[in-house]
Amino acid sequence: MNNLFDETHDPKRKSWVASAQGHADFPIQNLPFGIFSPQGEAPRGGVAIGDEILDLKAALASGLFSGQAQEAAAAAAGAALNSLMALGIAPRNALRKRLSALLAADGADRARVEKLSATLLHKAAECMLHLPAAVGNYTDFYAGIHHAVNGGRRRGRDEPLFLNYKYVPVAYHSRASSVVTSGTSIRRPSGQRELPGEAVPSFGPCRKLDFELELGVWIGPGNALGEPISIAQAADHIVGFCLLNDWSARDLQVWESQPLGPFLAKNFGTTVSPWVITVEALAPFRQPQPPRPAGDPRPLPYLWDDCDQQMGAFDVELEVLLSTEGMRTKGMPPQRLAVSNTNHLYWTVAQMVAHHTCGGCNLQPGDLFGSGTISGPTPSGYGSLIELSQDGKQPITLASGETRAFLVDGDEVIFRASARRGGYVSIGFGESRGRVS
Ligand code: MN
């Protein structure tokens, strides 16, 4: 993890794209990759800059890249970013540096690029955003320790965490086919439900529909089957991050999960934010993994790396908002339900990669991890309704006067995230949105 900082993080660097200055999500220091289509045109790779999207295909055709940056731009010009993800750090970072130079107010090529801006730039509001990659595999971890503790307490266990929790980055293999991009509506699933007072399960629409606030992780080159990725090498395989909503049908989950874990409760939809916030962009917001509480076991050697412990965690603030039909009718803005932070993860992303592959499982470019629900230690940080409403026993009251135990049709769940640190320019993730229908 050498050379984390370069000119792309310079807080003094400004863009000639006016809307990038002071932009909450996409100043020139961010430069996230995504897949977009201008009206009526085919999807292709782009980079968010302020309120605009730079078209990588058009920039490539204009001859703005050479060397490794050109290789990366060519890999990002198609309808999915898997090829870019497969290239790894060096070409991706070369492209980032070149894009930063092309968009910089004092860049050597500014006049040439600005002249091309009618073909290179599209207003983001007029474009469709798509899934950034074809997701081959999606694995959902359980690394938010406060969420895990809350779940154990809810189930009445004296010791809320299972013994394995502090040794194993617990996860299950989830469903890739139903990962959708922000803005896609989520249809309430039907399935077998078991509710108190009912002698036998019934089939019907989920009555405990929930969201889960998670960090999504986009995987890069990956490994050959049978060849583990060591924790020291794990960073080479982490491309970047998104917001991830692991929609959950709690009444289906509680009935079906014994003993193999969630199935239909989690496979009907997972929403991700469309922009890949690269690890390079997040370099200023790295932090040490918080020390384990006294008495917790030290991770086994294959999960321990000094460098990862020193800088493998991230300080990213996460926010959940809810917009109900009632709020929209009254012209009320979405209401914030919780604020949390990625530093509540008990395991680093590198530890997840090392554990996922230690038995030989092969990761592939465009694979997706969910971190697990990232709740804070107190109710103001709870990242799911089952925690916020205590499994429906204490519905929350909204500013509109409505109450919520779980989601009702028409509810829209919005996630946002931002990273801040003194001396650096803040960056954001954009949004993950999904409305229940
Ligand atoms: Mn989850």
Image: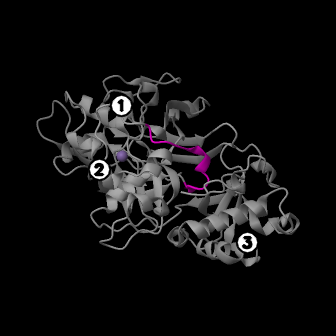
- Which amino acid type is shown beneath numbered disc 2? Leu
Residue located 46% across and 69% down the image: 221
> Quick one: label 3, few (<14), some, or many (20+) residues within 10 Å?
many
Q: Earlier in the sequence, mark 1 or mark 2?
A: 2
State left or right for residue 209 relative to residue 185. Answer: left
State left or right for residue 383 relative to residue 263. Answer: right
Q: Which color scheme did the rendering employ for the protein?
A: one colour
Q: Nearer the viewer, residue 162 or 392?
A: 162
From this view, report whether residue 346 is shown above or below residue 68: above
Q: Say if disc 3 is inside 8 Å of ligand 1.
A: no
Q: Secondary structure at mark 1?
A: helix
Q: Position of residue 374 (x, y in %)?
A: 42, 39
State left or right for residue 26 relative to residue 83. Answer: right
Q: Which residue is mark 3?
A: 59
Q: Which residues are magenta?
A: 274-290
> Quick one: label 1, few (<14), some, or many (20+) residues within 10 Å?
many
Q: Earlier in the sequence, mark 3 or mark 1?
A: 3
Q: Which residue is mark 1?
A: 387
Q: Secondary structure at mark 3?
A: helix
